[in-house]
Amino acid sequence: MMRLSRLAMIALVMLSCARAVSAQTPAAATTEDPPFYGEFGGGPTFGHHSSGYYGGEVGYRVWNNLSVAVEVGHMGNIGSQDLDDRAAIIASSVGATFAAAYQVTYYDFGVRYAFNMPDHWIKPYASVGFGAAHVTAVTGFSVNGTPVTPESIGITTGNDLNGTETKGFIMIGGGATAKFKERYFGDLSFRYGRILPDTAAIDGDTGVNTLRLEFQVGVRF
């Protein structure tokens, strides 16, 4: 967590410096920002497992500070206690160890509301979205430290441990954008994503919580 705090602090300092440089250049009269925006970036994920993510977002302002948006991204190593418990049952039955995780590609459609601030170049915002997640379970087994295939040790895994399912996805987030060079901005945010269970495809399936800290850069047009 200390490393995440340092990263966030460095990002804010860099954005402030960029703003200071752009402020030294005389500009035309301030006008309303263009309605479209696009941004791309990455950052760490954390929770049951920690890894990284990359993705992007595009949006369109429909009324005052309210925008509709769609985001797409990929999280590389997401886990859950339920996944570990399922893998542990099989691994222990044959004297093996395991490593289990989800690879998640997600998208969601939603809204984003920016709050007005006295210093208009920085704007906090809140967002919510609903969509789907393409979830691939990847479970490996080892015996005496040597990776082995499930078949070689007499076991068979199902889609819950090695397979792909598409599930519902809900995102709730908040952050702030910092404007520089008129049409460009940096975006620092924290987003929670909930991958919904699909008990029709996987018996006893449970939901998966995801957390990500996002560092993105974007442009308005």
Image (cartoon, rainbow, N blue to C red):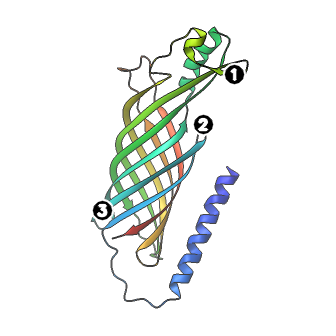
In the image, 155 versus 169, the foreground residue is 155
The residue at which mark 2 appears reads as 49
Report the amino acid beneath label 2: His
The alpha-carbon separation of the residues under discs 3 and 2 comes to 34 Å
> Does 219 appear above or below 88?
below
Report the amino acid beneath label 3: Tyr
170 sits to left or right of 54: left
Which structural element holds mark 3? strand
Count residues near mark 1 (Cα–Cα under 10 Å), then give few for <14, some for 14-19, many for 20+.
Answer: few
Q: Residue furthest right?
A: 144
Q: Position of residue 74 (x, y in %)?
A: 46, 44
Q: Identify the mark at residue 194; answer none if there is no mark.
A: none
In terms of image quadrants, where is residue 7? bottom right
Report the amino acid beneath label 1: Thr
| Residue ID at (39%, 49%) | 72
Task: Looking at the image, tell me whether mark 3 or mark 2 is earlier in sequence order.
Answer: 2
In terms of image quadrants, where is residue 100? top right
Which structural element holds mark 1? strand
> Does 77 appear above or below 217?
above
State the quadrant of the C terminus. Answer: bottom left
The alpha-carbon separation of the residues under discs 2 and 1 comes to 22 Å
Nearest to viewer (mark 3 / mark 1): 1
> Does 140 appear above or below 220?
above
Which structural element holds mark 2? loop
In the image, 146 versus 54, the foreground residue is 146
> Does 60 appear above or below 75?
below
Nearest to viewer (mark 2 / mark 1): 1
Q: Identify the mark at residue 146; answer none if there is no mark.
A: 1
Q: Identify the mark at residue 60; answer none if there is no mark.
A: 3
68 sits to left or right of 203: left
| Residue ID at (40%, 68%) | 219
